[in-house]
Amino acid sequence: MIGLLQRVRRAAVEVAGETVGAIGPGLLVLVGVQRGDGEPQGQRLLERLLGYRVFPDAEGRMNLSLRDTGGGLLLVPQFTLAADTAKGTRASFTTAAEPAQARALFEALLAQARREWPGTGSGVFGADMQVSLVNDGPVTFWLETA
């Protein structure tokens, strides 16, 4: 499972002109599900997201995690993260999980996140979403669980 996390000052997701998820300071995470992923990969990704040290401490060093700061978490499904771009000029999605499996795993990740981090927001799987954010730093990391 892939998580592209961005430290943000604020972020929001709209579907058909309606805001379906929004946070203030925290992490916006685009989530890609690959073939072979299961709930253990989702659980590991969530552990890393909540504990990853990307927020500044008193000296301005990235030593604090979401757990330390109490910031927001916004999870957005993004199947294109699982693209194979090694050849040609068009991405292949053979490494991406099938839509039904990806939806189930994203929803399991989201449910677990909401249990562990109340107030977690999300995008809508399979929807045409407009994502807006103010990247803080900018700080962006690619996390992948095997």
Image: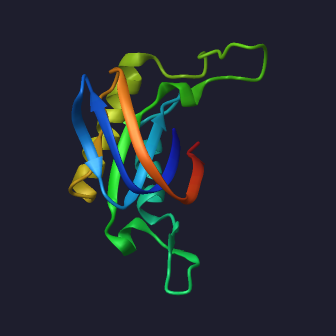
Q: Is residue 64 above or below residue 48?
A: below
Image coords of residue 28 (percent x, y): 42, 49
Asked if 34 appears above or below 11 in the picture, the reply is: above
Residue in the foreground of this view, choosing between 18 and 114 = 18
Is 89 on the left-hand or right-hand side of 42?
right
Q: Is residue 35 visible?
A: no
Question: In the displayed structure, would residue 24 be above or below residue 125?
Answer: below
Most distant residue in the right direction: 87
The residue drawn where x is 50% and y is 50% is: 5
Q: Determine whether, in the image, residue 107 is placed left or right of residue 142.
A: left
**Is 17 or 140 nearer to us in this picture?**
17
Left or right: where 59 falls relative to 7: right
At horizontal 39% and vertical 22% (from top left) the residue drawn is 101
Image location of residue 139, percent across then percent down = 57, 58
Q: Is residue 121 visible?
A: yes
Locate residue 40: give its quadrant.
Answer: top left
Identify which residue is drawn at 50% across, 81% down: 57
**Looking at the picture, how far across and down is residue 36, in whole percent?**
53, 28
Q: In the image, residue 21 lies at what x, y percent? A: 26, 42
* Image height of 100 relative to 73, above or below: above
Q: Residue at x 46, y 30 (%)?
A: 78
Left or right of 20? Residue 90 is: right
Quarter of the rendering containing residue 146? top right
Front residue of 94 and 85: 85
